[in-house]
Image: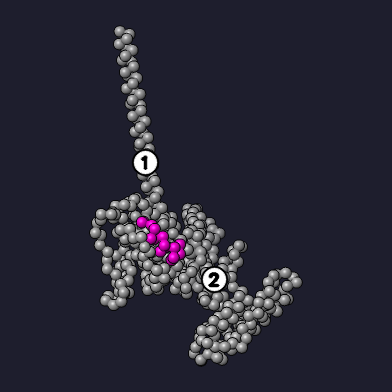
Amino acid sequence: MLAKKSVDKGPSLFYSSLSVMLNQHHPLFILSHQVNWLVFEEAFAPLYCLDNGRPAKPIRLMVGLLILKHLRNISDESVVEQWAENNYYQYFCGELNFVPTVPCEASELVHFRKRIGESGVELILRESIRINGKDAEEEHVSVDTTVQEKNITYPTDAKLHRKIIAKCKAISERNGLKQRQSYTFVLKKLGVDQRFRNHPKNKGRARKADKRVRTIAGRLVRELERQLPPDDHLSEIELFKRVLAQKKADKNKVYSLHEPEVLCISKGKEQKKYEFGNKVSIVYTLNTGVIVGAMGFRNEYDGHTLEGALDQHEKLSGKRAKSATVDRGYRGKTRIGETTISIPKPFNNKKSGQYQQTKLRKGFKRRAAIEPVIGHLKTDHRLGRNFYKGIVGDNINIMLAAAAFNFKRMMNKWKSSLFALFLNWFKLAIFTLNELVEMEMRSQTEQINSLESKLAF
């Protein structure tokens, strides 16, 4: 059920409205007036029933909390706690007076993300692009891909087999089934043998212990399959069998039991050979520095992600990019629709003139600006490790991180403009003070000269 809209009753006897108390030059205060909250109200209102159930939290509150979470790089629990302490957070989310309690439970943000889905989060990204104004209307973009890692441990067969054993025990206890053997002490001894496997004396012992743990896991899965009804826990048992059957060189392996969609991606990094998550494509304006597209993929070749990324950019901004500058990972694509794809390569003087070569070189150098932007998305806006569940959670986290980057860009711009305004005011004050001092010294000199002329007379 939709919540009723709050009405500003003006200052009361004990406190004033937040709009009066707060600094109106604060970036969050300015951002709260720049965002078109009515767009979210109209888009998300049909997702609620009108006259049934408990009234929901205001839509502006929930959208504001999602933005603040990725803007400040904090968790659901932290953003809810900090909201109760921060006046600017409350004003940004639509509160008119200070509220000393938490706005909602942290789990309600999970339900709200599921309610609005990918299309709703894409609307937040579109609004962040609109706020950047003419900077987001540039027709030349640069595109690059990166990996968004999932919140899973580094996968090994031994870890997965032990997790299967633990899950089989939990399912048996939950359904009141009795296991023939729990293998508690056996697994404890095998765990000792599995340690220090890289030492030459321990390799054989660790290999035998791994094989024994796998045998125990398969035995418990088969026992569980016999005891349970035919359709009970079928998907989990099939997943266990798939993990136990996979080999080292297999494709489409399972790397996590709670996130089976996770992929192993290698980007050729020296410091991190393999990353476990999904691929992300970022579209970034070449000169103005606005993220105008952020999309999740599985593990496609970079050139195959380009068409979808450019289509999303056209959908969000309303314009098709004239040119896209990419790196050599996109080889094989020279044109997609009306967009020209520029890839660094040796120049042929006969085909292109000096002016064209210089222009392309500048574009390729400017394309490198997207690399630190990806770094900021990972370290400052929660793209580095994704805690949301499933493929939908992957895409939601990507778009919220990109939207937070765009909002932060405008906040920094307002900060710099205010600083420039203060600097100009300070310079004017110094100049005026110097003028006053000079006038005072001039008047004193004139008085002394007049006095000396009188004495001489």
Q: Residue at x 45, y 67 (%)?
A: 397
Does the magenta portion include 87? Answer: yes
Q: Nearer the viewer, mark 1 or mark 2?
A: 2
Q: Residue 26's x, y, as percent?
A: 36, 52
How crowded is the residue under tag 1: few (<14 C-alpha within 10 Å), some, or many (20+)? few
**Residue segment shown in magenta:** 74-88
Instruction: Tell me where residue 52 sits by quadrant.
Output: bottom left
Where residue 425 sits in the image (x, y, percent)? 35, 40
Amino acid on which the number 1 mark rests in the picture? Asn
Q: Is residue 148 magenta?
A: no
Identify the residue at the far front of this view. Answer: 14
Looking at the image, the residue that sits furthest to the left is 9
The residue lying toward the viewer, choosing from 215 and 138, is 215
Tell me where residue 81 sits by quadrant: bottom left
Rendered view: 440 above or below 42: above
SS label for mark 1: helix
Spatial CA distance of label 1 from label 2 is 51 Å
At a point 53% along the width and 84% down the height, the residue shown is: 173
The answer to whether one can see residue 118 in this image is no
Q: Amino acid at mark 2?
A: Ile
Read off the residue under disc 2.
152
Q: Which residue is mark 1?
A: 424
